[in-house]
Image (spheres, helix red, strand yellow):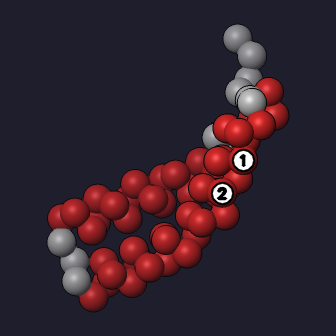
């Protein structure tokens, strides 16, 4: 089984991956601040989801 390779994707899909990767850190910071000041179950869930996606991009799993 081959490893996932993002550069084999179509150009439009690579463009969306780059946009999501660049916008994720500011969204993660805002969500972290929101969770610190107004903690709800949904905020904690979203913070965990965004953190997981950010780590996946950082470790190049996506």
Q: Which residue is mark 2?
A: 19
The residues bearing labels 2 and 1 have C-alpha atoms spaced at a distance of 6 Å
Kind of element beneath mark 2 = helix
Could you tell me if the residues under marks 2 and 1 are in contact, i.e. CB atoms within 8 Å?
yes
The picture quadrant where one finds residue 21 is bottom right
The picture quadrant where one finds residue 39 is bottom left
Residue 14 drawn at (x, y percent): 72, 41
Label drawn at residue 44: none
Q: In the rendered image of this protein, does residue 44 appear above or below residue 11?
A: below
Q: In the visual, does 28 lie left or right of 25?
A: left
View extreme (front): residue: 12
Report the quarter where the N terminus lies: top right
| Foreground pick, 48 / 23 | 23
Q: In the visual, does 54 lie left or right of 41?
A: right
The picture quadrant where one finds residue 44 is bottom left
Q: Which residue is mark 1?
A: 15
| Foreground pick, 20 / 49 | 20
View extreme (left): residue: 40
| Residue 41 visible to the viewer | yes
Q: In the rendered image of this protein, does residue 36 appear above or below residue 50?
A: below
Residue 12 drawn at (x, y percent): 71, 39
Kind of element beneath mark 1 = helix
């Amino acid at each position: 089984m081959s490893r996932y390779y993002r550069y084999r994707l179509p150009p439009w899909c690579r463009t969306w991956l780059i946009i999501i990767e660049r916008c994720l850190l500011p969204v993660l910071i805002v969500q972290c601040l929101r969770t610190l000041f107004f903690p709800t179950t949904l905020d904690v869930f979203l913070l965990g989801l965004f953190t997981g996606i950010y780590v996946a991009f950082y470790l190049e799993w996506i």
